[in-house]
Image (tube, grey):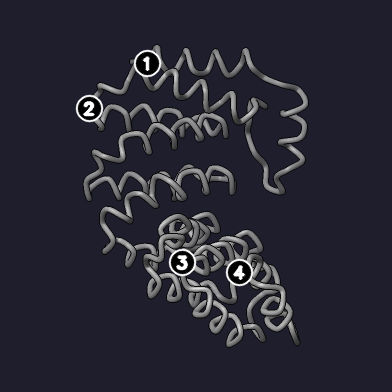
Amino acid sequence: MSGIIESVRQQLVENVDPKTQESGKRFFKEEIKLYGVKTATVTKIGKQAYKLIAGLPKREVFDLCEELWQSGMMEESFIACNWAYAVRDRFTEDDFAVFEKWVNEYVSNWASCDTLCNHTIGAFLELYPHYAERLKEWAGSQNRWVRRAAAVSFILPARKGRFKVEIFAIAERLLLDSDDLVQKGYGWMLKSLAEAYQDDVYRYVLGKRAVMPRTALRYAIEKMPEEKRREAMKRV
């Protein structure tokens, strides 16, 4: 099935947009590798190609994802994430090792991190919630993207009110993290949990506002009523 990867790459090359390429380079603080293809076009290319591999065994789909990840190209990582998410109804516990490897070895920017974690890993956690304990370990990683992944993997489950205890535990571990992208990640996680548990999140940030980085705090309270936002930001 190597021809699938070649076809995907050829289509990406054919759809390079100079404006997207230039704006993409300005949008990220870290160094990135990208074709410069609009996200909607990347999604369309990935979906069309997936139709040709949908019947493959899951392991073969993951092998193709791995090949895409290895290129280091951001758009290819998006397609890899979408293909992995497409087989979520076939996830088993041993897939965690695959996802953990991708986070550790291949994720190199916040967009790839969030695309993988929000959907693929988030879906895995909903199927196998006890793996939330493993994400607590990620919060202590030296790798900034693994630490961000520890938080943003909970975004979608948090909106459903799941993993409240684990989310507060991870927020505690990341509380004083000096990396702004990690701060934004766990602030976003708390903001998502607030959709189901606003009062609990509000009490948490009030208790931590003296030490919580301003970036994380602003993210956490972004969707709260104005009065609560003002109160939470006092003396910060």
Q: Which residue, given by chain and number where applicable, does mark 1 sit on? A: 2
Q: Which residue, given by chain and number where applicable, does mark 2 sit on? A: 57
| Sequence-first disc among 1 and 2 | 1
Q: Position of residue 52 (x, y in %)?
A: 35, 16
Residues marked 3 and 1 touching at CB (< 8 Å): no
Q: Amino acid at mark 2?
A: Pro
Compute the Cα span from label 3 to label 1. Answer: 36 Å
Q: Which residue, given by chain and number where applicable, does mark 3 sit on? A: 139
Q: Which residue, given by chain and number where applicable, does mark 4 sit on? A: 220
Look at 45% across and 55% down and name the residue there. Answer: 156
Left or right side of 132 for 216: right
Label 2 crowd (10 A; few <14 / some 14-19 / many >=20): few
Look at 74% across and 85% down and name the residue there. Answer: 234
Q: Position of residue 5 (x, y in %)?
A: 43, 18
Compute the Cα span from label 2 to label 4. Answer: 40 Å
Q: Nearer the viewer, mark 1 or mark 4?
A: 4
Of residues 19 and 207, the one nearer the viewer is 207
Q: Nearer the viewer, mark 1 or mark 2?
A: 2
Of residues 195 and 88, the one nearer the viewer is 195
